[in-house]
Amino acid sequence: MSDYEGNLPWLYAGRALRSFSTAFLTVVFPLYLADRGASATTVGLVLTLGSVISAGMMAVVGILGDRIGRRPMLVGLGLAGAVGALALAGVGNLAVVVLASGLGGVGRGGGAGSGGAWGPFFPAEQPLLAGSVSAEHRTRSFARLGFVGVIAASAGSLVAIAPSALHTSHLSMVDAYRLIFIVGAVISVGVAAVSWPLREPRPGRTVRSVRHAPSDRVGEPASPDTTAARSDGASVPPEPASNLSTRQLVGRLGFTNAVNGLGFGFLGPLLTYWFHVRYGVGSAELGVLYAIVNLVSALPYLGAARITRRFGSVHTVVVTRAFSVVVLALMAVVPTFLIASVLLALRTGLNSLGIPARQSYTMGVAEEHRRGTVAALGSLPSMVTASISPVVGGALMGVFLDTPIVGATLFMGINTVAYYLAFRNTRPPEERTAPGPRAGVERTVPGPTGDAERTVPGASPGPASG
């Protein structure tokens, strides 16, 4: 058991608050811009520039979090979100809107079903969660975090109905949206408050309960981070996190996430605008839709850990992503809002099965003291490419309305293939089932940098010495 398992309730609470707020802001923000008279191109441009700011913040959070701690990063991001939301509520200048949306992550939450697993928060949140549980329970904890997030997001999506309701009370739509931003600011203060009690080791210190050495018998839980003894009395170093160095891991994550970011940039923030233009629906209908979609996508999170244990992290991610891409493609050809909504719910549910596996896998194969950096730098290309797609997609929608769906399908399909090719031969520690050390038996372990292998004599069946 980890010394930091008490972090879990606070991490779940922070995700719940953030997801609740993100859910309605993702729906409201593009419509707020449209009601102010912004064109599709302007909407895309604002989202793009805001994403650039968020990308820079994410890099800072990941790198600084590994050096000075992840808790201060979460507290600071909560306060930054409050400042950004208040600025949106009080200032109408377009430049301020761009800056405020970037600081607060407004309008970008990973889309329906992600439960807020997007943006500058996760390079701090994910290493904290991974460091608070054992390797065997890591995927399950990520699944529970996602479940809490989508349930909260389902409730938060209903808040998007409020502007239409307030408008019937003779309040202008723009003023109604601004009132919603104030609610978002209050919730962001709450995110900072629940992040304050989090505990973490001093930067650079290893949490012994999380890193595991191979067990003495197949099928038994691994023991805490210790070194096994060889028959000649020498010690065997604990197994590395993966056969990839940090640089290799960041490079492969960066490439696959860059392609995925291009797809998400088309689908995420522009999806509500696409529904609005194609089917003539407003914030009330979209609020109900996103509430239902988030509720439906919560159930797959509960089965994600079991599926991952059976099929492995990489296969779980690839297969669920492949099916979700096929369903997404069908949205471009259906004639009614109802059918498109059903397909969106199905696509989101399939995608939800792979989200905890992907997040847990990245933390599992990364060195513990570099997890924040890996999360940030590995995902930074996604943030950058995702910032390009909205402005391109927004401009192309004037010529081809279904650009968001087609663009997302193309790039997410490429990402699925690329992810499989990049990680099919790399497994996290909990998925390595090779027999433990035995007397007179040799085992092969990855070299220190992951580029070479070395053969180590097995240890005696007795207890490890030292």
Image (spheres, helix red, strand yellow):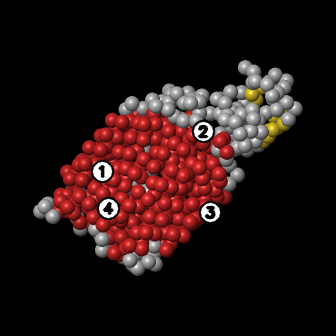
Q: Nearer the viewer, residue 13 or 102?
A: 13
Residue that carries the numbered disc 1 in the rendered image: 100
Q: In what element is the residue under mark 1?
A: helix
Residue that carries the numbered disc 3 in the rendered image: 417
Residue 220 spot, x, y in % from top left: 70, 36
| Residue 260 in sight here | yes
Q: Specify whether 235 is left or right of 377.
A: right
Marker disc for residue 287: 4
Residue 152 spot, x, y in % from top left: 37, 50
Mark 4 or 3, closer to the camera: 4
Q: CA distance from mark 2 to mark 4?
A: 37 Å
Q: Is residue 36 above or below residue 334?
A: above
Answer with mark 4 or mark 3, whichever residue precedes in sequence: 4
The kind of residue tagged 2 is Ala
Residue 310 spot, x, y in % from top left: 65, 51
Please report the residue visible at 37 percent of the width from the left and 55 percent of the height from the top: 154
